[in-house]
Image (cartoon, rainbow, N blue to C red):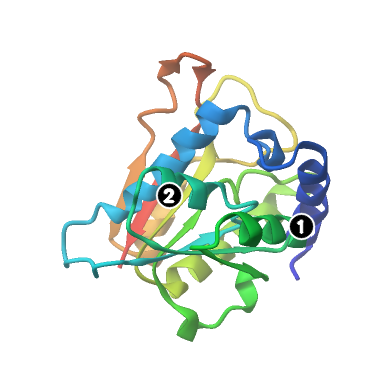
């Protein structure tokens, strides 16, 4: 397992033990922020062509305790949901709480391409860096994006903290949206949508500082 994956396993095990199935339990500021990000992930489904299968499959990387599965149920989204996470306690919670979803304990880097899904999403999986160096985080980021894209049949979605901010937190990883877009277009796919529009908009709880990316086959 990758060094960062091991660090995040310990970190998320600790915060889930402390906060349970809440926004704080997956390290988001509050419930409003969390639901906003879930909706951003689900927008990857809004691809008009080619036609989607009647019930497209979706893999949620770093699914935590299954919050996205909860959002899917609440919004009545017709998706075959699969969640994978390295924290066993979170997977156990998801399995017991959302019987219509599929949860797996595992590392995405150990998954093979025959386990493909229509869509692959990763909400918050490229935000925490803890004490990992920037070069190590850059390497991990590109590895994870490539792996997600390899496992999808149609498209992926993920979010990252933007460098277009007026302050930073040492344990978080910030990515230049311009540099990322250039790399994606050159190395991954010409079909990319980068949503930075909500990052600078004031909301009822302040401002958001991340952006969401959609990459399609």
Secondary element under disc 2, as helix, strand or loop, is: helix
Residue in the picture at 47% in, 39% down: 37
Q: How many marks?
A: 2
Query: Is 31 placed above or below 192 here?
Result: above
Residue in the picture at 17% in, 66% down: 51
Residue assigned mark 2: 73
Q: Looking at the rendering, which quadrant does residue 84 occupy?
A: bottom right
Answer whether residue 23 is visible to the viewer in this image. yes
Q: Position of residue 154 (x, y in %)?
A: 31, 68
Q: Is residue 157 left or right of residue 65?
A: left
Which of 66/206 is in front? 66
Residue in the picture at 76% in, 45% down: 16
Please give the label number shown on residue 89: 1
Q: Position of residue 144 (x, y in %)?
A: 56, 63
Q: Is residue 53 left or right of residue 143?
A: left
Circle 2 Cα neighbour tier, 10 Å, few/some/many (<14 / 14–19 / ≥20): some
Please give the label number shown on residue 80: none
Query: Is 110 placed above or below 27 here?
Result: below
Which of 215/116 is in front? 116
Q: Looking at the rendering, which quadrant does residue 85 occupy?
A: bottom right
Residue in the picture at 25% in, 52% down: 46
Answer whether residue 139 is visible to the viewer in this image. no
3D distance between C-alphas at marks 2 and 1:
21 Å
Q: Earlier in the sequence, mark 2 or mark 1?
A: 2
Which of 158/86 is in front? 86
Query: Is 18 placed above or below 205 here?
Result: below
């Amino acid at each position: 397992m990758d060094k960062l994956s091991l660090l995040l396993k310990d970190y998320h095990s600790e915060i889930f033990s402390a906060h349970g199935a809440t926004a704080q339990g997956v390290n988001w500021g509050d419930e409003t922020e969390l639901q906003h990000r879930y909706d951003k992930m689900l927008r990857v489904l809004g691809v008009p062509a080619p036609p989607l299968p009647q019930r497209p499959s979706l893999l949620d990387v770093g699914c935590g305790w299954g919050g996205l599965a909860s959002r899917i149920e609440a919004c009545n989204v017709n998706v075959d949901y699969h969640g994978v996470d390295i924290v066993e306690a979170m997977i156990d919670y998801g399995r017991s709480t959302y019987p219509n979803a599929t949860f797996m304990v595992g590392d995405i880097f150990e998954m093979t391409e025959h386990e493909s899904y229509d869509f692959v999403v990763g909400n918050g999986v490229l935000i925490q860096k803890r004490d990992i160096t920037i070069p190590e985080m850059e390497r991990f980021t590109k590895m994870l994006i490539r792996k997600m894209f390899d496992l999808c049949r149609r498209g992926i979605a993920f979010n990252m903290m933007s460098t277009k901010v007026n302050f930073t937190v040492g344990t978080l990883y910030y990515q230049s949206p311009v540099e990322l877009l250039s790399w994606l277009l050159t190395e991954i796919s010409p079909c990319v949508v980068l949503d930075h529009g909500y990052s600078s908009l004031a909301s009822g709880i302040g401002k958001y500082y991340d952006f969401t990316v959609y990459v399609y086959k």
